[in-house]
Amino acid sequence: YHCHSLHPAGVSCVGVLLESHISFHTWPDEGVITLDMFTTSSKPLLPALPEIERLFGVPRVNAETGEEEEPVSVWSHELRGFRTDEERRANVYDDNSDLSNWITSPLEVTKKQIVTVKTEIQQIDIWDASEREDLPSYEDGVRLGFGPDDPRWMQHEYASPTRLLFLDGALLAIADSDAEFHESLVHPGMFAHPSPKNVAILGGGDGATLREVLRHRSVEKVTMIEKDAKLVELARVHLPKMCNCSEIVGSTEVCFDDARVELVYQQPKDYFALNNLTDIDFLVLDGTVPETDREVPEHWFNDKKFVDAMIDSLSENGVLATQVGTAPTILDPRADLSVFRHRERFINSLEANPKIKSIFIYEEAHCGFYEPKAFLVACRDVTCRRHWYAETDEIDYAIYDRIGGLKDGKPSLVHYDGATQRSFQAPPRAWETVYCRREPEPFECAYRGLDKNAELFEFDPENEEESSFEIRMSKNKETGEDEVGVYAKVDMPEGSYLMPTHLAASFEVSDDSMENVHANTQIEGVDKATVIEDFIDFIDTHGHPSIQEGSGKNYVEVGGSFMMRISEDPEEANVRRWIPSHPDGGRPKFS
């Protein structure tokens, strides 16, 4: 080793041991020492951190307060040298892993290792982390008694770190935003079912998915199939917030101890192979999602036989929900040729199964990850579309009715509500863009936008000269009676758009609303409401159910288009839908 003194104070040293070395520089006036350690050993240097901090992290006394200040360690752990791709993937500290990107590599992150355990199944890492610009949260302010003008709101040292859970180097959960993630994973699918009683969770060893499921008062039984018992054990001790059910009415302090819960420590594939399940109302998959260009045959996304077994386990109106990784962008290539090939294969398996009637995809950007997370819900019954596309107030009432509040009267949910569900009903354009990059291109992708070269022909009853249509009386060929009809005044090329403004004025009415209106006409002891009956007759005559089966929606034309004459003879008709019927019949499950 060799040391060199610095001026006016400090020292620089370097020492070499076989193929390894250590060097350090000190700045006594600043109370700073920097160290660089390099080793050719296959073992990480992280276990040496506590000893380094003990030896070199000398506390100093604050000149103003006289109090001893705890030393702060800022460090980065990097892998160097030569490794095959397989060796890099197998190392949780490789710079491609979440553990490296979030914790061990960045210098700007202050981190503390809570626990690292290597089980027979996986490596479990739990860390506390915060960034230098982090400021106290609302919870920090309440806990520390900050007032509105307290200067400590702007001081980083009063900010609590967030706790992160990694499995084999992949980030699974972030404690500070776990509500946003797990509420988005669980509740959209749970409310797509009218009354889920029997629930199964695959994975979910941190307890957060279980916590959200147990909020639903309809739930009578939850079977949680977790492959690693050690993860549940560690969650009880180190992730208490995520598995805390103490505020849920009718539950227990720790979610795992709820009487409705059965914990099964087994590989999910083995569990399904040994149990002939057919009555699961809601099945949720809570685990990591592979995003890589290599094959991962052991993952359930790539096992069609297991996907079919999960679908078979659902009840007649059962629902499956899962997270499906990072949301795509409009620049992504074909899904089956990208790192999302495993997700695409999973979706293909769902599409190919005749028992799945509808698939919904959605994403949430508030989960705390670097990019928005995507989720998927698949239903065995088309009626789940009615629940999925429910109005905002319907969802809010369903939450109130089925979940209610906490023991202290506060709302149960932090993030999910009717407005959130409304945003889930129309996923971002990137999903459509990537879907339409499939080969061959799906039929409906030819109709993603209007034909800008097509002509528009409008009906304007207040300007007969400009109007392309007119209203005339004519004889009905079948009844011989006079009827009002709309007629073209000019030649209209095939492919033109007819009365777009009038069609846009159509209104939507749900089956539930129609039932309520009909019921109002049947009240005994009340005079007939002619206006309501005329309204019902108008809807029956000029309305039609949505072609999206199970949505419970009806569309009623109120413009000039409702006066188009109807013919039973296809050869006589000269108007068709903008989008023709799908060649396969019906509508795609996922589109």
Image (spheres, helix red, strand yellow):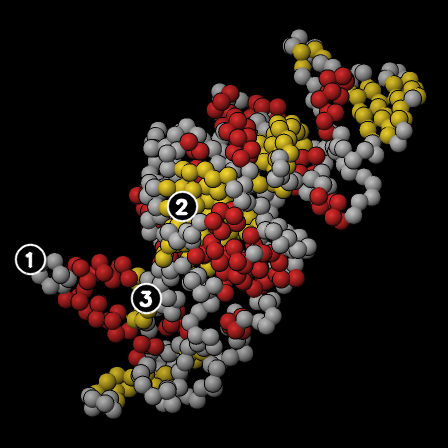
Determine whether the residue tagged by mark 2 lies in a helix, strand or loop: strand
Instruction: Give the residue type at disc 2.
Output: Val
Determine whether the residue tagged by mark 1 lies in a helix, strand or loop: loop
Q: Earlier in the sequence, mark 3 or mark 2?
A: 2
The residue shown at (28%, 86%) is 472
Q: Is residue 110 above or below residue 313?
A: above
Q: Which residue is mark 3?
A: 554
Q: Which residue is mark 2?
A: 199
Q: Which residue is mark 1?
A: 525
* Quadrant assignment, res 489: bottom left
- State which mark lies toward you, 1 or 2: 2
Q: Is residue 250 above or below residue 294?
A: above
Residue at far front of view: 274
* Quadrant assignment, res 158: top right
Q: Is residue 67 left or right of residue 541?
A: right
Q: Earlier in the sequence, mark 3 or mark 1?
A: 1
- State which mark lies toward you, 3 or 2: 2
Instruction: Give the residue type at disc 3.
Output: Asn
Residue 363 rendering spot, x and y as whole percentages: 52, 51
